[in-house]
Image: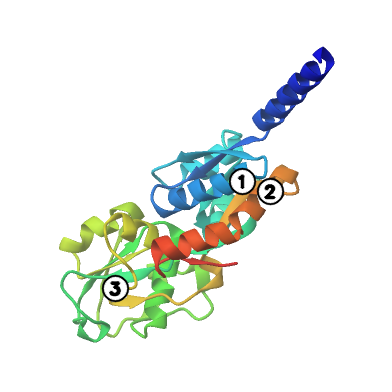
């Protein structure tokens, strides 16, 4: 009996040691990314992976923290933003999986449809390069402006070659865009910040981005960890039926799974 008890105690301690070793810190931005990762955390726990979900209020710190080893992964950005961060800051981090799509949309407190946008309207854009380009590409897709041919995800306001309605562009921090709606005619806002402000891209926007693969959310890790077993478990947990159901039930089409 003593031997059985000792064996059981050893097994419990060993299991506890494994669980402790497999606790990973995941950086997210508040709102939907955090909500989804809490569900991923539930699923991951059943697979022996413990996640510590840590919220950051901006777009810069989660990549710096990941690169520095203060995080093990993050889930808050799309590929063009990560590419820009790696190019500008030299981060040694990579994406390992796609997550969900947060479509950008145009919102207004003054205008009810795209056709009602007046000449000379003031349009607020995100001031970070990747989402600023995304906003401009959406305006081009809507037939409102034209951009330098082939500029793609590197577009800036300087690339607006056709502006027949003489729009004025104001570049603001992405998190501040919902608050700008009283002062501008239109603000182009990503879904995470829109939902935080009580805006739903399905019901409240005057136009909405289509599904664009470059702007799908991603999971990122340090390059050295990309093939680690815990990363595979993290991806499996995120890409689970339980998480897909949670996203569909919670966000009702405002955010869509990509798996």
Looking at the rendering, in which quadrant would you find the N terminus?
Answer: top right
Furthest residue in direction top, as rendered? 2
Q: What scheme was used to colour the molecule?
A: rainbow
Callouts 3 and 1 close, C-beta under 8 Å = no
Number of numbered discs visible in the structure rendering: 3
Badge 3 or badge 2: first in the primary sequence? 3
Q: Is residue 211 visible?
A: yes
Callouts 2 and 1 close, C-beta under 8 Å = yes
Residue shown at 54% from the left, 44% from the top: 63
Query: Could you tell me residue 236's position as x and y percent?
Result: 66, 54
How far apart are the two marked residues, 3 and 1, measured between alpha carbons?
33 Å
4 above or below 39?
above
The residue pinned by badge 1 equals 44
Looking at the rendering, in which quadrant would you find the C terminus?
Answer: bottom right
Residue shown at 67% from the left, 45% from the top: 47
Query: Could you tell me residue 192's position as x and y percent?
Result: 38, 57
Badge 3 or badge 1: first in the primary sequence? 1
The residue pinned by badge 3 equals 203
SS for dot 3: loop
Badge 2 or badge 1: first in the primary sequence? 1
The residue pinned by badge 2 equals 233
Q: Residues within 10 Å of mark 2 (few under 14, many from 20)?
A: some
How far apart are the two marked residues, 3 and 2, measured between alpha carbons?
36 Å
Residue 76 or residue 58, whichever sits in front: 76
| Quadrant housing residue 183 | bottom left
């Amino acid at each position: 009996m003593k031997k059985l008890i000792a064996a059981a105690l050893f097994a419990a301690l060993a299991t506890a040691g494994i669980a402790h070793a497999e606790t990973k810190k995941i950086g997210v931005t508040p709102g939907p990314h955090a909500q989804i990762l809490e569900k991923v955390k539930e699923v991951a726990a059943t697979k022996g992976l413990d996640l510590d979900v840590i919220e950051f209020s901006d777009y810069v710190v989660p990549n710096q923290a990941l690169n520095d080893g203060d995080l093990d992964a993050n889930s808050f950005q799309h590929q063009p933003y990560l590419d820009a961060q790696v190019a500008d800051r030299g981060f040694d981090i990579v994406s390992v999986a796609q997550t969900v799509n947060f479509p950008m949309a145009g919102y207004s407190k003054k205008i009810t449809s795209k056709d009602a946008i007046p000449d000379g309207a003031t349009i607020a854009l995100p001031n970070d390069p990747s989402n600023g380009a995304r906003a401009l590409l959406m305006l081009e897709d809507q037939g409102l402006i034209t951009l330098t041919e082939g500029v793609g995800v590197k577009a800036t306001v300087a690339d607006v070659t056709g502006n027949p309605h003489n729009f004025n562009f104001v570049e603001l921090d992405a998190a501040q865009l919902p608050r700008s709606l009283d002062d501008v005619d239109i603000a182009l806002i990503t879904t995470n910040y829109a939902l935080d402000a009580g805006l739903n891209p399905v019901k409240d926007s005057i136009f909405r981005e289509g599904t664009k693969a470059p702007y799908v959310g991603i999971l990122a890790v340090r390059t050295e960890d990309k093939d680690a077993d815990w990363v595979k478990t993290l991806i499996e947990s995120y890409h689970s039926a339980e998480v897909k159901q949670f996203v569909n039930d919670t966000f009702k089409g405002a955010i869509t799974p990509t798996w």
